[in-house]
Image: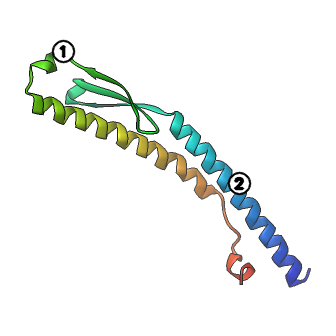
Amino acid sequence: MNKATNDKMGLNDIMKRAQDMQKKLQDIQKQVADMEVWGQSGGGAVKILMTGQHYAKKVVLDSNLLKEEKSVIEDLIAAAINDATDKIEKGLRDKMGGLASIKLPDDLGDIIK
């Protein structure tokens, strides 16, 4: 096989792998968008259900919490939101790890020169 044929096969292989990676990325984006997580704080006194798109769907406050000062409640709500956000980001990182399984050709540099 001559270099031109080998380069063409290499380029085709790169394009196929790029398409595979794009498909996996789209699948991951959908999975994360469909995700729902509970964030909580204050030992469960505040719970927030959040989607993978960072929309709060539900807020649950322990009735005993309502006796606390307003600033304490506000801090606990913010902490629960942050907890949910951290869980979403961790889920995204875990799912994105699968993209590392798509390998590009070792001779990529030679092919695109």
Residue to which mark 1 is pinned = 63
What is the secondary structure assignment of the residue under circle 1? helix
- Residue 16 in which image quadrant: bottom right
Q: Nearer the viewer, mark 2 or mark 1?
A: 1
Q: Tell me where residue 89 appears, x and y as whole percent.
A: 42, 46
SS for dot 2: helix
Q: Residue at x 9, y 19 (%)?
A: 67
Tell me the amino acid under the disc marked 2. Asp
* Residue placed most toward the observer, 23 or 69: 69
Image x and y of residue 26, in percent: 62, 47
Q: Is residue 5 left or right of residue 25?
A: right
Q: Earlier in the sequence, mark 2 or mark 1?
A: 2
Crowd class of label 2 (few under 14; some 14 to 19; many from 20; radius 10 Å): some
x%, y% of residue 24?
Answer: 64, 49
In contact (CB < 8 Å): disc 2 and disc 1: no
Closer-to-camera residue (75/105): 75
- The quarter of the picture where the C terminus appears is bottom right
Seen at 85% across and 77% down, the residue is 6
Q: CA distance from mark 2 to mark 1?
A: 50 Å
Name the residue that disc number 2 marks. 20
For image coordinates 66% across by 54% down, the residue present is: 22
Q: Nearer the viewer, residue 89 or 2?
A: 89
Which quadrant is home to the N terminus?
bottom right
